[in-house]
Image: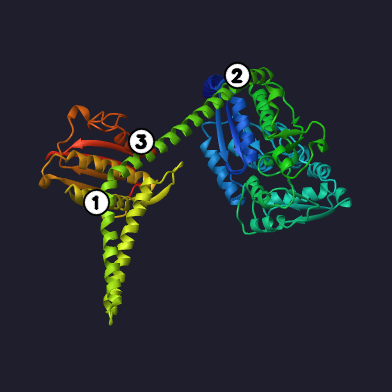
Amino acid sequence: MFKIYYNICLCLSAMACVAIASLALLQGGEASAQSRVPRVLILYPYDERVPATSVAGQSVRTHLMDATDGKLDLFSEFLDLGRFPQSAHLDRMSRYLTEKYVDHQPDVVITLGEAATQFMNTHGRRIAPDARIVYGGFDKETAVELKLPTSAVGAVSDFEVEKTVSLAMRLQPKAKRLVIMAGSSDFDQRWLRSAKMGLVNIEKAIETTYVTGLSIEEFAEQASRLPDDTILVVLTIMQDRNGRNFAPRTALDQIAAVASVPVYGPYSTYIGSGAVGANSVTFESVGVAIAKLSLDIIAHRPVSNVEVQPRYLVDARQMQRWGLSESDLPPDTIVSFSEPSLFDQFFPQVMGGLAFILAQSVVIIALVFERRRRGRAERESRSRLHELIHLNQSATAGALAASMAHELNQPLGAILINAETAEQLLRSDAPDVSLIRQILVDIQDDDRRAGDMIARMKGLLKKRSEIEWQEFDLNNVVNSAAQILQADIARKRVHLEIAQDGRKLLVRADQVHLQQVVLNLATNAIDAMQEFPVADKKLKFETRLDLPSGKVECAISDSGGGIAAEKLSSIFEAFYTTKAKGTGLGLSIARAIVEIYGGRIWADNLPEGGAVFRFALPHAQGPLP
């Protein structure tokens, strides 16, 4: 008896110890739960590309974090049920989430959309048995059909495609046809069945066609051929006939881009992707409603289902594209992407801006007058420059006149002698015809030679009032100048050397102007050697392409006495001259001409004696390799 009593005492003592230990653990667990921050898990039914759930989810996250000042453990999971709807995938996701959150049990699980809610309703006891479910993104009837636990609450919304069609009929009152497009996924087909039930009455008023089971290209091709009196509504195309998956907004965008008629849809996310309008809740508002329910649960406040009201939504840009009138819109329609009047929005800023613009206008008018005055001055300056260049050309022609006349006498004299000889031969009894023919050839050659001299002189004396832009080889200009100077060079017994680049050195300028530059520099060089012995008189023309700069360069050098170092920087100034009878304008005019065409001119002394003048111009075809 004593032994039995002893055993009973032992058992009671052990039970008391276990009870005390369990009570301590329970109290410790409660204290731990109260001390940690709340945990919220957001379940997305598809992947991150689906705008509806992405927008709603981001709205939930933003509102929760702002309301709790970031004191919240927020988790997100993408179930990807659009691409993997199979039960095996659902089971794997259930096991994966159960193991993942075994030590981080969420207090609230937010399910975005019907598919995520169905998943949590089936597998929730396994993943988070104590968590409250907060759902959203579908209507009350669907919530009832899902047979959710009584602890689940949600932000329900009505997605009534018939209201979207009614909006379209208001905007297109002359429409005679209604086309409804939907994709091939299970979700797409549920939407299509729902639309058919909702449009029973509307089908009596307008010819209605349901289009499904096509590829995205076929959807777009059909949309591009619809008659003008058609209303086109695109529900969702999450998958086409070929099994390709799409974000609904992406599919709509492809169809709307080629559609021959306005396009409508049942989602707010379609606004901005080509749809004219919709009757829908905004997914931002759904997210806010879900977040508020979750916060009430975390704070242990009583909660119940809330209803997020749909609104009429339109895209002002698409309205304008299709010529639809905003006066036909239902009251309280939200118009997105409209351009509000600056005057209405920012009256003080607009008035200040107008005052600023007025002040600017006064300044601009003054600047315009100043520009015109400056333009007249520049035109007058160019006109004076052209006159100055012409005077310089005339002076050069005058300086070369004696040499040119001497040179011209040679072909004219030869013509006279040949003509007299031919006359004598013709008077003979048996004139030598072959000799007379040769005499005539010589006369023609001498005539052309004289004609070329006169043409060069005429070009030198030609007066012009505007620049004649041409693209030409600088080598040709140098050769032409050398021919003009040929008589003067021969008379003054100067040795001329021409070294030219083998390539074409194309520049864009007035050919006569650049010829004048070469003549000015060459005549100065000849004059600089006037007092030197004949053997030392050497004039050199050189052209080349300067590869580093991509510029065409011409150098004219002499073997004279050079230029004093202190005068190198001032020799191109107007009226500066070292000649007793010089005007001091030749080099100044040369610099003005070169700078007009984007070039530069400079002078140096040669190490072996004499001076060299160089000018460089941009290549007409840009830098060359």
Q: Amino acid at mark 1?
A: Ala
Q: Picture quarter containing residue 277?
A: top right
Q: Secondary structure at mark 1?
A: helix
In front here: 453 or 428?
428
Describe residue 304's horizontal placement relative to residue 485 as left or right. right
The tag earlier along the polypeptide, 3 or 2, is: 2
| Residue 615 visible at all | yes
Query: Which residue matches tag 1?
Result: 487
Residue 117: image location, x then y, percent: 67, 39
Q: Badge 3, how many Cα within 10 Å: few under 14, some, many 20+?
A: some
Describe residue 226's horizontal placement relative to residue 522 as left or right. right
Marks counted in the figure total 3
Residue 424: image location, x then y, percent: 27, 73
Query: Which residue matches tag 2?
Result: 359
Q: Picture quarter containing residue 143?
A: top right
In front here: 620 or 423?
423
Q: Amino acid at mark 3?
A: Ala
Query: Which residue matches tag 3?
Result: 592
Residue, x 69% and y 32% (percent of image)?
A: 339
